[in-house]
Image (cartoon, coloured by chain):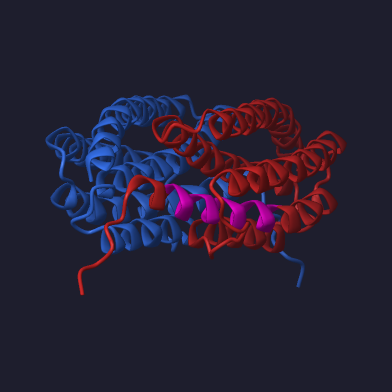
Chain colours: A red, B blue
């Protein structure tokens, strides 16, 4: 029996399931990160991104509707690996001066993973003639980029404080 | 016994080991991706990035010297997860029209992971008063960004070809 040809629309569907799983994983992880963070700015940034992520999951639900498939995730080993590294940092650096810097690094790794996936999906949606899906994906991509920039700003201030603490420690 | 305080320099060292492992993993993966790719442009891009990666590993060796530690990696579950997804695509889409689009997506996920790590390490090197290390990290970050841009360009042309193939299939 010949194998069914795997086309761009199949790849789009597979990748949509991948990011759907990832976003749902992030929904569970962000409250833990917000709770662990020392800096108020960082706590607020994580809480804000949690609300954004809820909206991003809604957009994914709309895209599943556009392609006529049920909204369902499939295990994304990449996000699981990134989350595992983040959990390790929360454990190893608990109560330590560098915890927030580590949390920020973990969060930015997540943002970059999402940026690569949403960029790819947006390009494919355009090529597959789905302008409405492309628009939804672009909206999320813009949010992820803005979050990454906001985290970079916090990273610089958090790291400054940490560095000072080290000088006096 | 009190736990040793984990400071920014410890986090820098841990993250350096993480990206050292990741780069060495990428060195093993890129030849397989170059061999699998259909598009000549994509093959060339992967081969070029292989040579760049060799230079990036050398820079990491220099940074280990700067901090007076042996150049040693530690398992990076994030890159392992991303690589696993790439291997799955190579298997599921072997000989299929959408293979190159899938390879590109996998490669861009890798680039984004590296960009987040090098950006973080560069910021920390500056704060820790290591301008030479910061310069080396910035050089690699610039290369990763350029590679990502080059891949985006190829992605658009590859996807165009695939989309046409689908219309006639």
Q: Main secondary structure of the magenta part?
A: helix
Write down the quadrant of residue A133 in the picture. Answer: top right
Residue B73 visible? The answer is: no
Q: Which residue, as the protein is rendered here, is positioned at the far front? A: B168
Give the x, y percent position of residue B83. Answer: 37, 57
Residue B44 visible? The answer is: yes
Write down the quadrant of residue A39 in the picture. Answer: top right
Image position of B114 (left or right of B159): right
Give the x, y percent position of residue B142. Answer: 38, 24
Instruction: Say if the magenta span includes residue B13.
Output: no
Q: Which residue, as the protein is rendered here, is positioned at the far right? A: A40
| Residue plotted at (74% across, 53% down) | A27
Magenta segment boundaries in residue numbering: A12-26
Give the x, y percent position of residue B50. Answer: 20, 42
Frontmost residue, B102 versus B133: B102
| Residue plotted at (50% across, 30% down) | B130
Frontmost residue, A82 versus A133: A133
Compared with B88, B133 (above or below) is above
Give the x, y percent position of residue A20. Answer: 60, 53
Q: How many marks?
A: 0
Quarter of the figure with the C terminus of chain A: top right
Quarter of the figure with the N terminus of chain A: bottom left
| Residue plotted at (20% across, 34% down) | B45
Image position of B70 (left or right of A59): left
Compared with B40, A85 (above or below) is below
Write down the quadrant of residue A159 in the picture. Answer: top right
Frontmost residue, A141 versus B22: A141
């Amino acid at each position: 029996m010949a194998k069914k040809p795997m086309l761009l629309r199949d790849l789009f569907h597979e990748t949509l399931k991948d990011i759907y799983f990832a976003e749902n994983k992030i929904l569970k992880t962000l409250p833990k990160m917000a709770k662990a963070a020392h800096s108020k700015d960082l706590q607020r940034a994580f809480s804000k991104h949690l609300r954004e992520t809820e909206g991003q999951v809604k957009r994914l639900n709309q895209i599943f509707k556009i392609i006529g498939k049920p909204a369902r995730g499939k295990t994304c080993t990449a996000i699981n690996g990134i989350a595992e590294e983040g959990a390790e940092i929360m454990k190893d650096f608990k109560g330590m001066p560098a915890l927030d810097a580590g949390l920020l690094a973990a969060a930015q790794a997540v943002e970059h993973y999402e940026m690569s996936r949403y960029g790819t999906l947006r390009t494919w949606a355009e090529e597959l003639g789905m302008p409405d899906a492309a628009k939804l994906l672009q909206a999320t991509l813009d949010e992820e980029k803005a979050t990454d920039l906001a985290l970079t700003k916090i990273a610089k201030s958090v790291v400054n404080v940490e560095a000072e603490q080290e000088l006096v420690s």
